[in-house]
């Protein structure tokens, strides 16, 4: 097995493991927190990408001369969940900004329906972008690396170039702007509330300290969300620019780097949107506490209530 497949195997294994664990604990919490619905969709998307997209790539012939059916299907099942995830992250960012900017009674909003609609719309959106290459707007073809298939990054017709330009705009530029704008707006709202509590109650007030902690977490979330998105998808955006606007040939090393970092998105999402908030830790500690309590009750000879 070559180095590329070894790296792919590691990414696939970790992505499947972390997303499976996250999906289990998220499902346990979905009735208590409606926002978890979107996190569950993210996990399902990353799992589909890892299982249906990455695992078949481990069995490709290292000396492929043309795109096989399995190779094209693997490319589709990488593109479909990727576009879905990007759409969902953008929708999450925009919905958060809109909800924070409007003054209304939160009880008037059915968050469950809202998040379900965002999830469904994101899957439809991702499917449309991923299926267009099968309909002649582009194609899934063998890369110059001969290691995998992907969207055709060597467009020859105007339709293929247009698809690549639109994909770059709607799959990278607009989502990135949405995420940055949402994070900055959220941070500003929290900072404004923190200043209000400082003036009204003083810096030593418990409520003021709570918003100070929220401000710190918002800044940390902003950095990690933007940086992860930029790191994972900038290489593919760079390839899109090379292919759509210049006649330069995309170097093989850039194709390898783009594939590597794009696949990392399925691995880092659980840490960004679930594990970083300590929800996994809380769920684990709650289970451990309950198990310890039952054990102590049984040891003392009492029946658990």
Image (cartoon, rainbow, N blue to C red):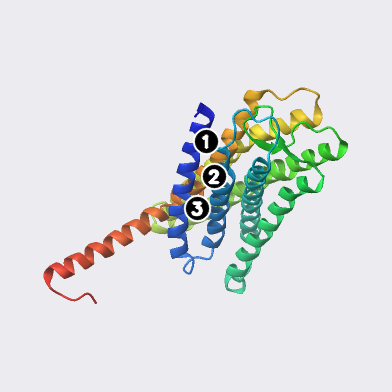
Label 2 element class: helix
Cα distance in 3D space between marks 1 and 3: 45 Å
Task: Please give left or right for residue 45 compared with residue 132 in the image.
Answer: left
Q: Is residue 219 visible?
A: no
Label 3 belongs to which residue?
Answer: 194
Dot 1 surroundings within 10 Å: few (below 14), some, or many (20 or more)? some
Residue 8, numbered label = 1
Label 3 element class: helix
Q: Quadrant of residue 68?
A: top right
As displayed, is residue 253 above or below residue 219? Answer: above
Question: Which dot, 1 or 3, sits closer to the camera?
Answer: 1
- The tally of labels here is 3
Q: x%, y% of residue 205?
A: 39, 56
Dot 2 surroundings within 10 Å: few (below 14), some, or many (20 or more)? many
Q: x%, y% of residue 10?
A: 46, 37
Q: Earlier in the sequence, mark 3 or mark 2?
A: 3
Cα distance in 3D space between marks 3 and 2: 34 Å
| Residue at image coords 51%, 27% | 2
Q: Earlier in the sequence, mark 1 or mark 3?
A: 1
Cα distance in 3D space between marks 1 and 2: 12 Å
Q: Earlier in the sequence, mark 1 or mark 2?
A: 1
Q: Is residue 280 visible?
A: yes
Label 2 belongs to which residue?
Answer: 266
Q: x%, y% of residue 181?
A: 65, 47
């Amino acid at each position: 097995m070559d180095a590329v497949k070894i790296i792919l195997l590691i990414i696939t294994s970790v992505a499947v493991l972390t997303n499976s664990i996250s999906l289990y604990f998220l499902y346990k919490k979905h009735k208590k927190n409606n926002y978890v619905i979107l996190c569950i969709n993210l996990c399902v998307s990353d799992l589909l990408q890892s299982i249906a997209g990455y695992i078949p790539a481990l069995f490709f012939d290292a000396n492929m001369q043309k795109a096989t059916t399995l190779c094209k299907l693997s490319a589709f099942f990488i593109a479909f969940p990727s576009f879905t995830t990007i759409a969902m992250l953008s929708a999450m960012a925009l919905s958060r900004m809109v909800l924070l900017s409007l003054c209304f009674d939160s009880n008037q909003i059915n968050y469950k329906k809202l998040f379900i609609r965002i999830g469904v719309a994101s899957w439809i959106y991702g499917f449309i972008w991923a299926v267009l290459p099968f309909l002649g707007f582009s194609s899934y073809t063998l890369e110059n690396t001969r290691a995998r298939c992907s969207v055709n990054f060597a467009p020859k017709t105007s339709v293929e170039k247009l698809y690549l330009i639109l994909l770059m705009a709607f799959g990278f530029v607009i989502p990135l702007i949405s995420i940055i704008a949402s994070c900055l707006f959220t941070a500003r709202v929290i900072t404004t509330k923190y200043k209000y509590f400082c003036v009204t109650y003083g810096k030593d007030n418990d409520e003021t300290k709570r918003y100070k902690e929220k401000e710190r977490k918002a800044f940390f979330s902003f950095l990690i969300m933007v940086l992860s998105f930029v790191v994972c998808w900038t290489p593919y955006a760079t390839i899109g620019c090379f292919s759509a606007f210049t006649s330069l040939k995309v170097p093989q090393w850039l194709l390898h780097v783009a594939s590597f970092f794009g696949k990392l998105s399925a691995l880092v999402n659980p840490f960004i949107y679930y594990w970083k908030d300590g929800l996994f830790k809380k769920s684990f500690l709650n289970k451990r506490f309950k198990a310890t309590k039952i054990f102590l009750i049984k040891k003392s000879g009492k029946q658990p209530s």
